[in-house]
Amino acid sequence: MRRSAALAALAAAALAARPGPAAAYVRSSDDRTGVELSWPLPVVPYDVSSAPWFPSPGCAAGPAGDPALDAVRASFSEWEQGCSSLHLVYGGRIDEIRVGLGGTGENLVVFRKGWCRAVLSPSEPCLSDPDVDCGGIYDCFEDTGGLDRGIVALTSVLYDPDTGRIFDADIEMNGWDGQAGGTNLAAGAGGPPDGWYFTCDKQAGWPQCTRYGEAGCYYIDLRNTVTHEAGHVLGLAHPCEGLSCTPALQPLTMYPQTSPGDVEKRTLAADDVAGVCAIYPAEGGGCGCGSGGAPGALAFLLAAAALRPRRWRGR
Amino acid sequence: MMRRRLALAALVLPLLAAPAAAATFVAASVEEAARSSEAVVRGRVTGTAARATRDGRIVTEVEIAVDEAWKGAPGAILKVVVPGGRLPGVAMKVDAAPTFAAGEEVVLFLARGGAIWHVNGWALGKFRVVAGEARPTLGEASVLPRKLAAGERQVGPMAVAELERRVKGAR
């Protein structure tokens, strides 16, 4: 793509995105070397764990489709912008619940099922063994302290600290354990009692959910959350922290605060678009993308090459 | 050739890797943090040592010289295990987890898993003390606001004296 075309694409993408403050985006970096993180190629495959989870009724798969999977895929696709060569390629469902160095190397989205100390026997060895993560065995979220249950979602990124090259990223969604449907899900001191209740839709007039298993209501929007976490996967940090967070930054997908019913982060603001396009510019990526974001032939070849080694391992 | 390069990268890169992480927390008050902790201490970091775990993670053992125990009686010296750390050629950075430096003065909200102390609430449970002010280091963590009990204060920067008063007054 020529420079003029790239600039035109950037301008078009910025106009299409939600407005927001300019140049507020912050890139993730290594705190010792200061090197900024990015994927070495603008084609990033990701998978969704096939482990069953306990969705809210509006997220449950049925004959008409799989709203939760649709939400995850839409969240990643949102980061594919016309000013960027980035392509996020969904690889499918895989039989994997481990993340980070303990996993098998796929970029994974996995739904945890409740808090480990609520669903496991107190005598379970992993609960008192710092060398073992219960989540990688039982697909729950390990909560040694009561406040640990306040964690809604967690993204881990593996990278080379000297070059900033990312080569693995995983998102854990700390979902409902499926037990005690109908009980109050209000978040207490450290979070809700049986895991976070993710919803996939929000319609005018709907109330905020108050009980696990409730339908026709909203709580933590799945797509809103995954879109934000996917930004971290790609090498973006929050634009502010603590007292430096002003209302002007709130429209950004990478803004570090959210609340039940927040769906604003589903759609990138102009500054989020500027961030992803700065990291993966259309011109430098060599993907041959058009300004509309249509994937070029080289992008598909890279995606196919990136996915193929995992098929060799029988996935 | 491309497949061979990618396969090679998959073998080599984990040895050079440094994970980072981002998390979303629900807001908590100092009083809630105190009530849900087995111990709350003010002390100084006297040493850190990272190590690999059996399941392929890196954790750091942090030694704390306790000056004051505001809750519980964890002893004069205690070891806290936190996710992340650096080993030669490989590091794990978890932005939602607290990090420590030797000599740092801290206030820690602690939970016990077996014989091991952990920081309760990851980054929410560690305050760094500088010039009389205690400041949590939330890093890449997002915060989900919620209404707190009347009179309680959300975890955030505050004077050490106020933090101590709120911890000791938590019921």
Image (cartoon, grey):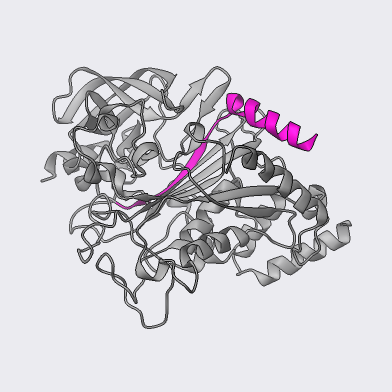
Residue A198, given in percent of the width and then of the height, sits at 38, 62
B64 up-or-down from B144: above or below: above
Residue A102, given in percent of the width and then of the height, sits at 47, 32
A126 up-or-down from B61: above or below: below
Q: Residue at x 19, y 25 (%)?
A: B68
Residue A17, given in percent of the width and then of the height, sits at 64, 68
Q: Is residue A207 shown left or right of residue A74?
A: left
Q: Is residue A111 shown left or right of residue A34?
A: left
Comparing A80 with A125, the one in front is A125
Query: In the rendered view of the protein, which quadrant contains the C terminus of chain A?
Result: top right
Residue B129, given in percent of the width and then of the height, sits at 34, 32
Going by the picture, which residue comes out furthest to the front?
A314
Query: Is residue A280 highlighted in magenta?
Result: no
Query: In the rendered view of the protein, which quadrant contains the N terminus of chain A?
Result: bottom right
Comparing A83 with B159, the one in front is A83
**Figure quadrant of residue A59:** bottom left
Q: Which residues are magenta?
A: B1-27
Query: Is residue B20 highlighted in magenta?
Result: yes
Q: Residue at x 59, y 57 (%)?
A: A76
**Figure quadrant of residue B51:** top left
Can the viewer see residue A239 in this picture? no
Q: Residue at x 44, y 70 (%)?
A: A62
Q: Is residue A32 shown left or right of residue A191?
A: right
Can the viewer see residue A35 in this picture? yes
Give the total number of marks visible in the rendering.
0
Going by the picture, which residue comes out furthest to the left?
B171
**Figure quadrant of residue A306:** top right
Q: Residue at x 20, y 17 (%)?
A: B76
Q: Is residue A23 shown left or right of residue A170?
A: right
